[in-house]
Image (cartoon, rainbow, N blue to C red):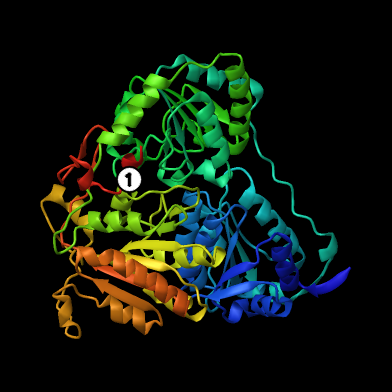
Amino acid sequence: MARMRAVDAAVLILEKEGATQTFGLPGAAINPFYSAMRAHGGIRHVLARHVEGASHMAEGYTRAAPGNIGVCVGTSGPAGTDMITGLYSASADSIPILCVTGQAPVDKLHKEDFQAVDISSVAAPVAKWAVTVLEAAQVPGAFQKAFQLMRQGRPGPVLIDLPLDVQQAEIEFDPDTYEPLPVATPAASRAQAERALAMLCEAERPLIVAGGGVVNADAADTLVEFAELVDVPVVPTLMAWGAIPDDHPLTAGMVGLQTSHRYGNATLLASDFVLGIGNRWANRHTGGLDTYTADRTFVHVDVEPTQIGRVFAPDYGIVSDAGAALERFVEVAREWKRDGRLPDRTDWTQQCRRRRGTMLRRTHFDTVPVKPQRVYEEMNRAFGPDVRYVSTIGLSQIQAAQLLHVHRPRHWINAGQAGPLGWTVPAALGVATAEPDATVVALSGDYDFQFLVEELAAGAQFRIPYLHVLVNNSYLGLIRQAQRGFDMDYCVQLSFDNINSPELGGYGVDHVKTVEGLGCQAIRVFEPDDILPAFEKARTLMAEHRVPVVVEVILERVTNVSMGTEIDNVVEFEDLAEHPDHAPTAIALAD
């Protein structure tokens, strides 16, 4: 067998496992690992400006395509602690990323050495596995186990911490005979599928709720096939948006307190049976459980046994990978359809489509400053079904989910449960790295944008073009709206008179100068009719310069976005669409 340093074996394993894209920052305690990447030559690397940014780049890379696993690399001490938010975000949304950190030598770990922190203990609550490898001969096994764990069951992140002396120690390793460990996947049985379909057939007004597990299993096509066979409308959760195209006749709309459609909530409330597949009944989807579950029967399918019954007890639970369950459901549904055992759902599906065509929010406003609804209307005009949206949290993300259109899985890439501010810029860079020929469009409010804006420099340096829509109201808009219940507007205003940019009229940070200073391009828009031309110009600039291009739209300061405390009590703050001109890009107009 070949004799090599432990880090050389680790890098060879990355290639064998197909994880050849890394994001990170070198440092003294991880330099041996970097030397192995340099010597190998087959591992690509993007130099981030902040280790948290690198972890979100790895997330975006993983989320962009089936089978991807992004790798985040950093040195000892604060590099590892900076990764924690990325680990949390990935863990919460069932996203596999591998974080690799350097560490002080083994004999220094208990001596408060410089930048020596017990990072495996810090990371353990937000990772599927976090380990400091103390013996060099265990390095190959640790990486092999990491990839198995990341892929198996509910996917998630792993952190491997490598002391400096462990990295450099020589071991015996044979890369030619290395094989990834097998991944066990629980699958629904025939009997379980028949029970679930029998319950569905007994219902008069059934729905399918598709969660992120459908996307993780790369099972969107099977989901659509199953929905068409049984003729049952589908509610995608935010993490599964695009698993069924928005313009499909069986798309029922999203449900929830914030990122939802009026017609989606109304349809859920009218249903009597819900089949949840690969979802987790998140509280912003369900709202109060008494309202959500009232007079409904539930079946829940999830790959993780402890997810079933975690939020509420379903009437029937199936532990299964979403893709494996859907394949079994399709098998049974085909037979039952051939035998005439599936009921006619025409009346119910037509009711759902009528709601989709009439319960619309208004998007067309000509006022100045620009109302945010108009931005999303113009995004619908500018970007076709192939666009890949990236966003994280805030009023911008909530209203975008209410008004934009997504037609394919992994074309709405969103930090769902954790929602860390600053996620969007680095995640978009990760997506654009994974899919360099795709139209990647990020969406941020001004505060999210400012958190990790420095990562745009990585986009300029490594020529990673994408388009970033920045809606600027110079406010922490979501927190301001939440403070209405406390009758205050406190510590949430970002506005100030910028002495260097008086043309901003009190909107504070000059994002155009900031973006240009980081080596990218930016366009500022004040008028609603200038939004679409700005998007067109941005695409030209992206093609010409191969860097990120930011389109900043100056919004009205205060907009209250539709939301509520229960799915039957969402407050609409704006006049609703009363005729087609009020929502000219609504999906319903294509029906």
Task: Decide if residue 535 is in sight here.
Answer: yes
Camera-nearest residue between 239 and 85: 239
Report x, y in % for residue 450.
Answer: 32, 71
Question: Which quadrant: the C terminus?
Answer: top left
Report x, y in % for residue 360.
Answer: 25, 40
Task: Decide if residue 451 is in sight here.
Answer: no
Camera-nearest residue between 76 and 268: 268
Element class at badge 1: loop
Q: Residue at x 50, y 30 (%)?
A: 227
Q: Is residue 492 left or right of residue 214?
A: left
Q: Vertically, is 462 above or below 446?
A: below
Q: Is residue 19 left or right of residue 77?
A: right
Res. 535 image quadrant: bottom left
Residue wearing tag 1: 259
Camera-nearest residue between 347 and 493: 347
Q: Vertically, is 249 above or below 515?
A: above
Which residue in the rendered view is the most extreme toward the left? 487
What amino acid is at disc 1?
A: Thr
Q: Vertically, is 376 above or below 448?
A: above
Q: Residue at x 56, y 61 (%)?
A: 120
Total marks placed:
1
Camera-nearest residue between 334 and 44: 334
Report x, y in % for residue 423.
Answer: 41, 63
Report x, y in % for residue 217.
Answer: 58, 43
Q: Vertically, is 178 above or below 522?
A: above
* Callout 1 crowding tier (Cα within 10 Å): few <14, some 14–19, many ≥20: many
Which residue in the rendered view is the most extreme toward the right? 1
Question: Which quadrant: the N terminus?
Answer: bottom right
